Amino acid sequence: MFDDTNGMANLLSITIFTFISIFLTNPDRPYASQYAATSVSSILYGSLDFSLAVDDFVPTRVMLIFVGVVMVLVIELLVLPRSSRTIVQGQTLQFFEDLENLLFDASKACGSISSLHSSSLNTEEHQSILSRDDPLWMFREGQEKIALAEELMKSVNNCSKTNAVAKSELPFGISEPSFGLFISLDVVGYEFLLLEQTRILTQLDLLMTTIKSLIGFYSHLPENHLVRSLHWPALLSAGILQLAQHLSKCADELRRVFPNGLCQPGACKVSQIIRAVAVFRTFEDVILTILSDAEDRHATYLNSINSSGGEVRYTPGFRLTLALAESAILTIGQSLSRCGQNLETIVQSFPVEQVELNVETEQHHLSIISEHEGNE
């Protein structure tokens, strides 16, 4: 076989092709080049060890590869379909449901902080804790008792996993062909949506830290301490609850227009989807309400200091902890508002024909209403 010049040329070209296939391997999609290299290696092995003619063996091998590809396509498309595009469309909406559950749990945890106290410490030990000069005590020893926050951390992990899956599948979902049967992902909309969801996760970490710090702090306070009379944890609980309740309304609207849990057209008109997504805009009103409540509570705090002659005392870092917790709550609200804007961008990328049909239908309804009012 090696005396045959054409055979040597074929083997040489196959060897070069194998090297190029391995050299140009895409780490994100290594299957294609690995399969090509394996196939060529089989051809070389069969040609050298079994004296098979390359011209006869190659067509057979190509036929077997074709049959294998057809089987894989049938399994992936019909039997066990998996689409990165579908995963991104589903996980970005699932994030809001996971966040909704987390916020309700966080509100309950904050509401129960005021009931914590410790009778094992004497008055001198309490005063020692409250007069420490370490501003980071709240973030170290203050987190000593975190039993109430363990379930919250599980909820945070659920949100993180949902976001991580969507981010990992987004590049493949963008490049995934639609074959004219599906809509392509809106790159800008989804990238910014996942960015805002990532920002929410960073603020959730900060919020969890402050909640655990407050749990540790109130666990060292006697029942009759003046700090309890201001009900700071109740203020945080109310703010988180407002976010959770409004997010619940938004999630209900999303479930109504996306009943299959995927952010894609089909179940409702695009105009209905846009109106549902627009509910996220009113998070700005929720933020203003939370700020107003915090302002009123701070005014009460100042009045209590004046009336008590400055006897209301805080451990160093307590007011910082409250400020960070309030900042995290407000930032989460702002990010949710921007999430709505990004969802609107995604919805606007839905098929133009469907949008035009919806506009024409609404205009037709308006004309009928106008004619009816004119007749009356």
Image (cartoon, rainbow, N blue to C red):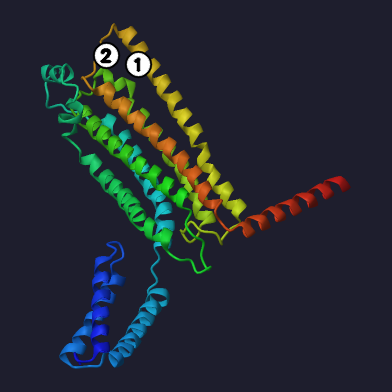
According to the image, label 1 marks what residue? 301
Q: Is residue 376 visible?
A: no
- Residue at (23, 35) in percent of width and height: 212
Q: Quadrant of residue 136?
A: top left
Q: Is residue 121 visible?
A: yes
Depth order, front residue of 266/46: 46
Q: Is residue 133 above or below residue 7?
A: above
Q: Which mark is residue 235?
A: none
2 sits to left or right of 322: left
- The CA span between labels 1 and 2 is 9 Å
Q: Based on the displayed image, in which of its 4 quarters is residue 192 positioned?
A: top left
Within 10 Å of the Cα at label 2, are there few (<14), some (14-19), or many (20+) other Cα atoms?
A: some
The residue shown at (29%, 6%) is: 309
Tag 1: amino acid:
Tyr
Image: 270 above or below 289 = below
Residue 138, horizontal then vertical, whole percent: 20, 27
Residue under label 2: 312
Foreground of the two, 27 or 10: 10
Q: Secondary structure at mark 1?
A: helix
Residue 293 location (% of width, % of height): 43, 25
- Report whether 42 appears left or right of 277: left
Residue 63 drawn above or below residue 279: below
Name the residue: 39% across, 47% down. 194
Decide: marks 1, 2 in contact (CB < 8 A)? Answer: yes
- x and y, in percent, of residue 23 in the image: 24, 66
Residue for point 24% across, 40% down: 148
Residue type at mark 2? Val
Compared to 204, does 138 lie above or below? above
